[in-house]
Image (spheres, helix red, strand yellow):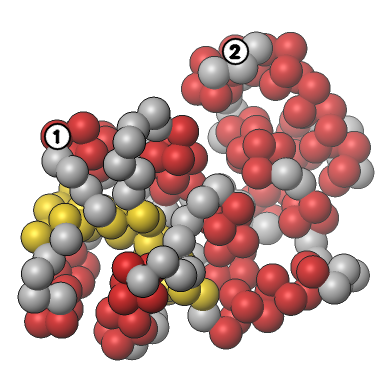
Amino acid sequence: MNIVLTDDHPLVRRGIREILQENLHDAVVHEAQDAAGLMATLRREPIDLVILDLSLPDRHGLDCLAEIRQRKTNAMPQVLVLSMHAEQRFALRALELGADGYVTKDRAPDDIVQAIRRIQSGGRYISPEVAEALAGRAFGQRDQPLHETLSPREFRVLRELARGRSPGEIASQLFISSKTVSTYRSRVLHKLGLGSTAELARYCLEHNLID
């Protein structure tokens, strides 16, 4: 089993590597400290599982996840998101983008191993907190934040606009037209009840949606 462990903190990578080597004896663990290193490893090695942190120095993990799922390749790696982010904030987005599991770094090491084994067997792993959030969405929970109503693409455009990216830059990154980006922007403004990109940025800051 080829695993690429992606995290920018060497001590975190070392700790997780030790957990993997102690419990998954057939695993070959590669390491990447940023998104560029992850993508280079995916091009070079036949990776079975990506363990992905969301807070990378050069790119957000959700963007990496989206690119992994868009790659045209016969061997699609499974992805386990392992993050410091509060689960309710990003877990649902990660699952919508195709993650096979989501674990926070404060969970016990046994949970990481359990998640990997569940994914290996063809299932998905989510913690009880994520399961509760999913149930709330399924039953139309009314107190969910407005951004939870956005589609994955709308949510991504929201975050890129809040970072100060221009429609042209976002269009190039998402391989769509600037006109389409403007359409998404209008939808996001309408759904969130906001009037400008500055208000979008303020909303994202208030809800901790950008690093």
Nearer-the-camera pick, 22 or 15: 22
For mark 1, give the secondary structure: helix
Quadrant of res 88: bottom right
Q: Nearer the viewer, residue 17 or 69?
A: 69
Q: Which mark is residue 44?
A: 1
Question: Where residue 156 appears, x then y in whole percent?
Answer: 61, 38
Residues 107 and 8: in front is 107
In-image side of 21 versus 157 (left or right):
left
Say which residue label 2 marks. Answer: 168
Kind of element beneath mark 2: helix
Give percent across and percent down for residue 113: 28, 79
Q: Mark 1: few, some, or many residues within 10 Å (few <14, many ≥20)? A: few
Q: Does 42 sit left or right of 184 as displayed?
A: left
Q: Residue at x 41, y 66 (%)?
A: 122
Q: Which residue is more in the foreground, 193 or 151? A: 151
Left or right side of 134 for 75? left
Residue 83 at least partly seen: no
- x and y, in percent, of residue 38 in the image: 24, 42
Q: Visible in this render: residue 13? A: yes
* Quarter of the figure with residue 155: top right
- Disc sitting over residue 132 in the figure: none
Q: Residue at x 30, y 41 (%)?
A: 75
